[in-house]
Image (cartoon, helix red, strand yellow):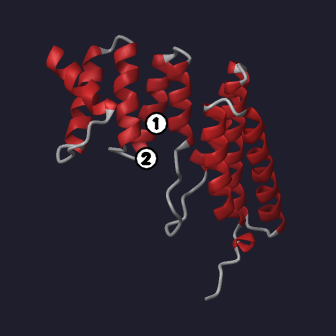
């Protein structure tokens, strides 16, 4: 059997480094996160050299997102938000190629998550709403919008997003915390 030569597909390798960098940053393993960020730099450079502009752009979004997660893990809130916003804006300016895989996580959604964690729910809500305009009914964005609206004191908005979340998951039998929060919030009203 012929093994796939992964080094010919830096964009595919980048997906693994991206998820590792995010996971490492979230668990406080800054050394590993920075090592994976270094790999993302290399993949980006390889794609630029190969004149693969689309994939170079996708990896640049991942690179900025990973750098934002590292800055956040190290307590650099302003730098983290600035990097995350630049990743989201770059991602938004790029037309998704029809045959490419969907991103692991949308940069703007992660920006919303970061703002929520930094106690900026109104700003987070605006980012989730922006994501929902291009990706309607996206689970993570609807759940984020619901939580952000609730934390921002927008009871009607929270109720609307929680209802939408339960509709999306009407046939689900899992016990995800977002669904439990939605049921609890709607039962309280």
Quarter in which the N terminus is drawn: bottom right
Residue 150: give x, y in percent of width and height: 34, 17
Report if the CB atoms under discs 2 and 1 are less than 8 Å apart: yes
At x 29%, y 22%, the residue is: 157
Residue 16: give x, y in percent of width and height: 63, 55
Residue 51: give x, y in percent of width and height: 79, 68
Q: Is residue 63 above or below residue 141?
A: below
**Residue 77 visible within the image:** yes
Corner quadrant of residue 85: top right
At x 18%, y 22%, the residue is: 186
Corner quadrant of residue 166: top left
Q: Which residue is mark 1?
A: 130
- Neighbour class for label 1 at 10 Å: few (<14), some, many (≥20)? some
Drawn side of residue 177 relative to residue 57, left or right:
left
- The circle on residue 134 is 2
At x 82%, y 56%, the residue is: 42
- The circle on residue 63 is none
Mark 2–mark 1 distance (CA, rounded to whole Å): 7 Å
Q: Secondary structure at mark 2?
A: helix
Q: Nearer the viewer, residue 21 or 109?
A: 21
**Residue 58 visible within the image:** no
At x 66%, y 34%, the residue is: 25
Corner quadrant of residue 68: top right
Residue 161: give x, y in percent of width and height: 28, 30
Q: Nearer the viewer, residue 67 or 158?
A: 67
């Amino acid at each position: 059997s012929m093994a796939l030569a992964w080094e010919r597909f830096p964009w595919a390798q980048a997906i693994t480094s991206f998820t590792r960098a995010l996971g490492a940053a979230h668990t406080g393993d800054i050394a590993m996160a920075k090592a994976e960020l270094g790999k993302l730099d290399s993949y980006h450079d390889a794609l630029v050299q190969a004149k693969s502009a689309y994939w170079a752009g996708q990896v640049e979004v991942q690179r900025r997102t990973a750098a934002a997660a590292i800055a956040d893990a190290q307590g650099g809130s302003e730098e983290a938000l600035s990097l995350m916003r630049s990743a989201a804006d770059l991602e938004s300016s790029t037309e998704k190629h029809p045959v490419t895989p969907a991103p692991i996580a949308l940069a703007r959604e992660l920006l919303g998550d970061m703002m929520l964690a930094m106690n900026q729910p109104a700003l987070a809500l605006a980012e989730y709403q922006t994501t929902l305009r291009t990706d309607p009914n996206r689970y993570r964005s609807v759940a984020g919008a619901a939580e952000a609206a609730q934390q921002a004191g927008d009871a009607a908005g929270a109720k609307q997003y929680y209802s939408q979340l339960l509709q999306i998951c009407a046939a689900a039998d899992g016990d995800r915390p977002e669904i439990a929060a939605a049921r609890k919030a709607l039962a309280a009203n």
